Image (cartoon, helix red, strand yellow):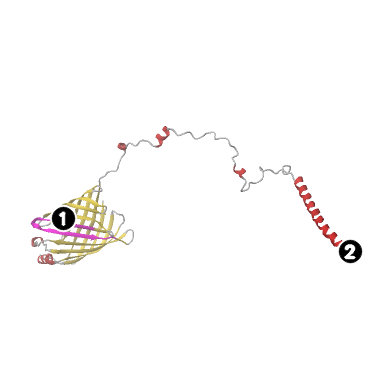
């Protein structure tokens, strides 16, 4: 091995030995600087403290009460006198209750008609007085033509609610006519059928074994909250022929009407409309023999009233 080769080998070995020493000197230098920084940095002397610095989300010292002393005026304990003042004893005998008796009078139709066979007036009214279950009903309807009352009746009946929407009626009806009068025993049912059809079905038993059945159905179509179209249909059937009363057996009369009213209030509503009446069977023959007509179409105008 030559002298140059030995020198190169010694130089390489000396370099590998010096590298760890150099790294250790740098690490010690950094530790010295860190020690100097921590030793020289006195936070208390710089004026920083936990009281002066802004609270952080994890700093619970900001939510601690500043003054832990209790309030000067604590809420007093609840006593029996306080409970008695909050819940006084109610004297029901001294209270004023609403009356259980109510009443209503409704003039369903008060109208002037102009038909092919004459002009005249017609009315239909009903009213009741009582409570929610038991009521006394009164109804009346009639017609005048050429200054004379052609037909009219008054009905008085006791009504009892048999369901939330239906009343059962039993009473008497008296027909008032220019020539003859007649009294009937009455029984029936009235109320609001499904789909808001106002329905009335009555049976009348009179002298001589005569029985009449009358049915009426009406419906209200709300065009607006005040403008209402009301179709109605009525039918009358008799069990026996009575020429002296102008009644024939079976279906005697059907009347259909269409009225358009405007409710200024629920208590006052004028209307106009059209009504058609037709007689059938022997009833039509009896009226024709008396100089009447089996059918008639009328224009009507009137008012509906509530009291």
Q: Is residue 151 magenta?
A: no
- Tell me which segment is drawn in magenta: 199-220
Look at the image and tell me whether residue 148 can be seen.
Answer: no
Between 57 and 83, the one lying in front of the other is 57
| Label 1, label 2: how far apart the Cα atoms are | 150 Å
188 above or below 287?
above
The secondary structure type at the circle numbered 2 is helix
Between 223 and 218, the one lying in front of the other is 218
The quarter of the picture where residue 230 lies is bottom left
The secondary structure type at the circle numbered 1 is strand
Look at the image and tell me whether residue 5 can be seen.
Answer: yes
The label shown at residue 6 is: 2
User: Which residue is pictured at 77% across the width and 47% down the height?
Assistant: 35
Which residue is farthest right? 3
The quarter of the picture where residue 16 lies is bottom right
Q: Earlier in the sequence, mark 1 or mark 2?
A: 2
- Magenta segment's dominant SS is strand
User: Which residue is pictured at 79% across the width and 51% down the height?
Assistant: 28
Q: Give how far across and how far down residue 262 sits, in percent.
A: 30, 59
Q: Give how far across and how far down residue 222 sits, in percent.
A: 31, 60
Judged by depth in the image, the label closer to the viewer, 1 or 2, is: 2
Instruction: Name the residue beneath numbered marker 1.
Output: 153
Between 250 and 256, the one lying in front of the other is 250
The quarter of the picture where residue 146 lies is bottom left
């Amino acid at each position: 091995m030559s002298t140059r080769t030995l020198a190169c080998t010694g130089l390489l070995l000396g370099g590998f030995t010096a590298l760890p020493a150099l790294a250790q000197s740098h690490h010690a230098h950094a530790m010295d600087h860190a020690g100097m920084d921590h030793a020289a940095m006195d936070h208390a002397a710089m004026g920083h403290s936990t009281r002066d610095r802004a609270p952080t989300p994890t700093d619970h010292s900001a939510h601690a009460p500043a003054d832990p002393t209790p309030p000067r005026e604590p809420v007093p304990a609840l006593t029996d006198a306080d409970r008695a003042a909050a819940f006084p004893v109610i004297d029901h005998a001294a209270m004023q209750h609403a009356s259980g008796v109510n009443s209503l009078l409704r003039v369903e139709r008060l109208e002037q008609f102009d038909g092919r066979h004459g002009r005249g007036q017609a009315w239909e009214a009903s009213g009741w007085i009582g409570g929610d279950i038991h009521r006394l009903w009164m109804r009346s309807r009639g017609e005048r033509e050429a200054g004379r009352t052609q037909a009219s009746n008054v009905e008085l009946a006791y009504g009892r609610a048999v369901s939330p929407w239906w009343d059962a009626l039993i009473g008497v009806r008296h027909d008032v006519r220019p020539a003859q009068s007649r009294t009937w025993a009455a029984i029936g049912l009235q109320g609001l059928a499904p789909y808001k059809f106002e329905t009335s079905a009555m049976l009348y038993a009179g002298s001589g074994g005569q029985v009449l059945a009358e049915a009426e159905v009406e419906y209200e179509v709300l065009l607006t909250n005040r403008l209402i179209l009301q179709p109605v249909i009525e039918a009358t059937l008799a069990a026996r022929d009575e020429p002296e009363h102008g009644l024939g057996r079976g279906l005697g009369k059907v009347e259909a009407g269409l009225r358009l009213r405007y409710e200024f209030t629920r208590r006052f509503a004028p209307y106009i409309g059209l009504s058609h009446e037709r007689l059938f069977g022997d009833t039509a023959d009896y009226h024709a023999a008396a100089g009447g007509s089996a059918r008639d179409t009328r224009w009507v105008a009137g008012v509906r009233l509530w009291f």
